[in-house]
Image (cartoon, helix red, strand yellow):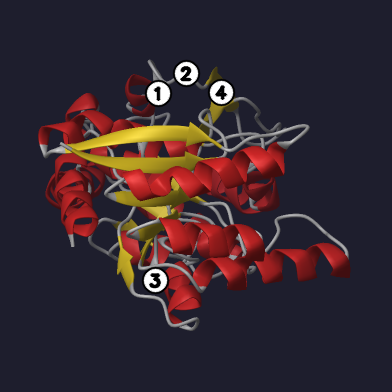
Amino acid sequence: MKRVMVLANNLAQASFRLRIAALIPHLAERGFVLDVKLRPRGYFAGWKLRRILRSTSDYHAVLLQRKFLEPGEALILRRSARRILYDVDDAVMYHNRPVGPLTRWQTRRRFLATAGILDHVIAGNEYLGELFRQRGCRVSILPTVVDVGHYQVKKHEPTETPRLVWIGSHSTIPYVQQYLAALEEAARQVPGLRLLTIANATVRSDVLPVEHEEWSESTEAAALCRGDIGIAPTPFDPWTMGKCGFKIVQYMAAGLPVIASPVGANAELVREGVTGYLPGAAADWPQAIARLARDAELRSTMGRVAREIAEKSYHLTRAADDWARFLDE
């Protein structure tokens, strides 16, 4: 068995759960043991981190997950590790909130220092991959995947109360709020239309009935089948361009057609007119929603193709095969 050190920042973070933890048993079957180290915090965090970095010579490879290193830390790791891989599924070189010039400079410095020592970057979409390619890194694109068999497949039937469904968290619910006027206009065009949110936050509307289910890892797959059309409204900015469209993969696994903004990985995942629609402006959303809400056969056809693509291209076993190859190069 080949030992790989994984240096992670937050074991509860979705990116770690979905892109690393879910693969641990699959990689063990392929001859790799992942030894997960949590990035130290608090007093003496820097000293503790340097101690971890110096111990990497005992491992077949080191995998950094999302976070960057200070220049001195990067130098220690490069001197100790045999191979260094980096996994990224967000535009972590930018910020999703306003920050000052000092913070931007510090982030940029860590990004450049970390990019300069990497042997291989595993990026969740092409946008992220290109940011690292510009720094001379070798890059492979690997979307966030799911255990497709865990997801029930929606049986689409005509309904007088078609449901849009959105899955996410409190950090991304503002995206739904930004598109709420467009969703409300769709509700005016399609009587009975409603919205189901699966998250730890929701929205309110006097026009569009909103149903809410608290997110749970154990119930999310079944909850998705209460919906008829998966939605992924996404504003355009440097942070959202790095989003890797995991909710779209979930919709596809559940056999749902998808309506998404053509931002970041969304445009790579949704096949226009085949598995869903990519309306470029909020004003175009009502028409796309109405088309699918009124046509159960179209929803069924698109959902079936989406599920087939998820089984072929976005399944855990395929990702494990890819990771095994990356780790062993």
Cα–Cα gap, marks 4 and 1: 14 Å
Cα–Cα gap, marks 3 and 1: 28 Å
Q: Mark 4 or mark 3, which is nearer to you? A: 3
Which residue was labeled with disc 2? Answer: 216
Categorize mark 1 by other alpha carbons within 10 Å: few (<14), some (14-19), many (20+): some
Cα–Cα gap, marks 2 and 4: 16 Å
Q: Mark 2 or mark 3, which is nearer to you? A: 3
Which residue was labeled with disc 3? Answer: 126
Give coordinates of residue 16: x percent, y percent.
45, 38
- What is the number of the mark on residue 153? none
Q: Mark 4 or mark 1, which is nearer to you? A: 1
Give coordinates of residue 70: x percent, y percent.
66, 60
Which residue was labeled with disc 4? Answer: 211
Which residue was labeled with disc 1? Answer: 220
Give whichever of discs 2 and 4 has the lower sequence position. Answer: 4
Residue at 66% x, 47% y is: 180
Which residue occupies the foreground of this view, 3 or 281?
3
Q: Mark 2 or mark 4, which is nearer to you? A: 2
Give coordinates of residue 318: x percent, y percent.
15, 48
